[in-house]
Amino acid sequence: MSNVTVINPNDFEQEVSAHKGTVLVDFFAQWCGPCKMIAPILDQLSTENDEIKIVKVDADEAQDLMVKFGIRGIPTLLLFKDGELAATKVGALSFTDLKAFVA
């Protein structure tokens, strides 16, 4: 069962910025083909690695966050460690590449 949670932009501070540990944030859209392709890969990672919290943010509802983090394309993955942005990837990744990105 997937441990990926969809959060709204108002919960970003609490769910991501204030979280102690690693959080992977997927900025996605319902209409985005590559976003749909990466969704099962994120689900798989969430079941195999319980040390990483994975959340999804609907880009269409999060324009302020998109501007804040300079996101111009989706899917965009942001990796946070103890509330600090550590890395960014744009585009769909394979499972192997995703595991290497969060390592």
Image (cartoon, rainbow, N blue to C red):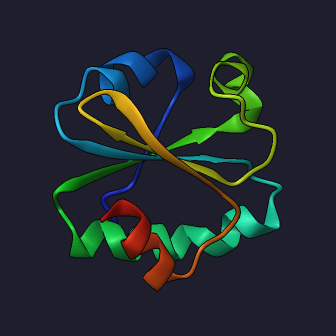
Count of picture labels? 0
Q: From the viewer's perspective, is 99 left or right of 51?
A: right
Q: Which residue is located at x 39 percent, y 73 percent?
A: 100
- Give the quadrant of residue 36: bottom right
Q: Which residue is located at x 49 percent, y 77 percent?
A: 97
Q: Is residue 59 above or below residue 93?
A: above
Quarter of the N terminus within the rendering = bottom left
Q: From the viewer's perspective, is 100 left or right of 81?
A: right
**In front of the other: 9 or 103:** 103
Q: Is residue 63 above or below residue 36?
A: above
Q: Which residue is located at x 23 percent, y 29 percent?
A: 19
Please state the horizontal and vertical placement of residue 26, each as a whole percent of the image. 55, 49
Q: Is residue 36 above or below residue 12?
A: below
Q: Is residue 54 above or below residue 15?
A: below
Please state the horizontal and vertical placement of residue 50, each as a whole percent of the image. 17, 62
Quarter of the C terminus within the rendering = bottom left
**In front of the other: 100 or 30:** 100
Please state the horizontal and vertical placement of residue 76, each as a whole percent of the image. 64, 50
- Give the quadrant of residue 13: top left
